[in-house]
Every structure is written in C-alpha cells, then in structure tokens.
Amino acid sequence: MSERIDKDRFEPAYAQLAAILRRQIAGGIYPPGGKIPSESSIGKEYGLSVMTVRQAIGVLTQQGLVERVQGCGTFVKSVSLTGSRFGLESIEDIFQDPGRTRVKVLRMSPGRADAKTAEKLELAEGARVILIRRLLLRENLPAMCHEGRIRCDFTRPLVEAELEVGPLSDLFRGNGGGVAKKCALTILPTVFDSEQARLLNQPEGGPAFRLEYLVYDFDDIPFGWGWFTAAPETLVLKTKLGLWDES
C-alpha cells in the first residue's frame, strides 16, 4: 500500500510528496535511468493538484535526484562516480605539518634508472638518477617508508627538499615551494616486505597501502617518482556519494 499525504500536518503536501518519492527512488521502485509517472498520474494517486506535484518534482530536481527531459518526462538520475573526490585528510596530516613529522634519511646515493624508472621519469634506461630511501616519523613514531628516484641534477632544490618532508609537503600546503608544479597520486594495496615490516613495526607480509607519486616541474617534466608504504590505518580515504545537505 502506497504512503499517503497527511493534509493536516504542518509540513506542506509538496514536501511530503517529495519525501515519499525520494524514499521510493532509494528503495529501487524507480531505478536510475527509470522514468517516474507523469505529474497527473501522481496527482491522482495521492489526491494532489498537478501544481503541488510539480513543486515536489522541482524539489527532487534541485536535489539532483531527477531530471526533466522535454517531451519525454522525468527520469531518475544516476549518481556520477566520476564526480566523487576522496578526502586525503590522513595523508595531509603527515605532509602538511612538518613540525610534527620528522624524516630519517636511510639512503641517498647515485644510481641508474631501471626500465620502470626510465619510463616514469622519461629518461633513457641506465641514465643516472638519485636513489632515496627514508623513514617518516609522526610524533616520533614510524608512519611511512619511502622509496624515491629523482633526476640526477644536484642543482635542483629537490635534493634538499627530500632531506625534509619533501615537495609533497609544499603541494599539500598549496604551493610547490619553487620546486614542484603538480603531482599525480595513486594508492594501491600491497604487503610489507621484511625491511618495511622492521622499520614500521608491522608483520612481514601484512596488508599495507602504497602511495605512489609522480612529481612534475614547471616545465611539465617528471623529475621525481617513488612511493610511500604505510599501514592501512595510516592512509584512510573518505568520500561521499549520493545527496548530502552541506548547508
């Protein structure tokens, strides 16, 4: 039995109808891409005027739940995942506040680009690069292991930046510090190898996240590639799907 409109309630009839239709959409009665009944049909079912139904549909349209197609009717919209954004608050906490994040450099030495490094940094295989291994500590507790490769150019301030938190810190704070223009980030599931497990006090083979980055200079040339490895609780990603009242 369909829900009814209580005309004695303080809530306007159009708002009650909008809530009813919203619940029906959420319950799959009207699936994404599906057409909802005409305004006249809905009016007859709930004993409402076409104008009141039109107001309810207008509310759903404003909320992004439905869309009117001229000459065809009103359809339920699909939630667009391409528009979703994952919050990086847990990562920002580490990179935005270098006062509470300490860096322990385990290795910084010249090396040669393997095939993967050469591809990422747009170099010839075997070209000279700088190899970096670091441990990031958050309030003196191990938080992330870092492996990096940068173009072998000691005139770049990036080498000095890597002795601290690195260019990602400046980018998270909204500037490249004269070093980095932009950065692509990818988060992948992985497991701890023996050294990572030892450094982070985690079980070898245990679940981990790998935060891979590729940093570009102001000529759009990739000059730094690497990854941070951390326990799952260190890299917590959050987003919202559907309709949220952000007011």
Image (cartoon, helix red, strand yellow):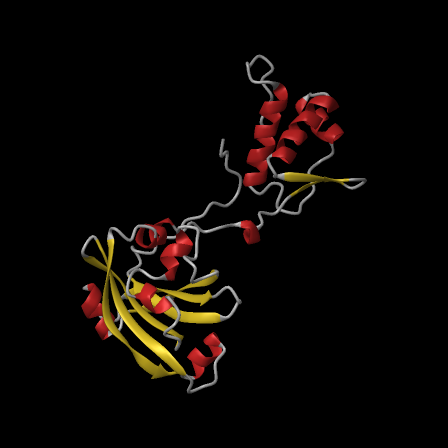
Residue 229 picture quarter: bottom left
User: On the rendered structure, is 66 left or right of 141?
Assistant: right
Q: Which residue is drawn at 60% across and 15% down?
A: 7
Q: In this view, does 120 lie to the left or right of 77?
A: left
Q: Where is residue 185 in the image (x, y as percent from the top left)?
A: 44, 62
Vertical side of 140 occupied by 13: above or below = above
Check the image and name the residue furthest to the front.
155
Residue sitting at 60 percent across and 33 percent down?
21
The residue sitting at the right extreme is: 71
Residue occupying the point 45% across, 48% down? 239
Vertical position of residue 29 compared to residue 115: above or below: above
176 is higher (above) or lower (below) than 4 = below
Q: In which quarter of the image is the N terminus?
A: top right
Among the 4 quarters of the image, the one containing residue 16: top right
Looking at the rendering, which quadrant does residue 113 occupy?
Answer: bottom left
Work out whether residue 230 can be spotted.
Answer: yes
Is residue 52 left or right of 214 when viewed as pictured? Answer: right
- Residue at the far top: name it: 8
Q: Which residue: 44% across, 66% down?
A: 215
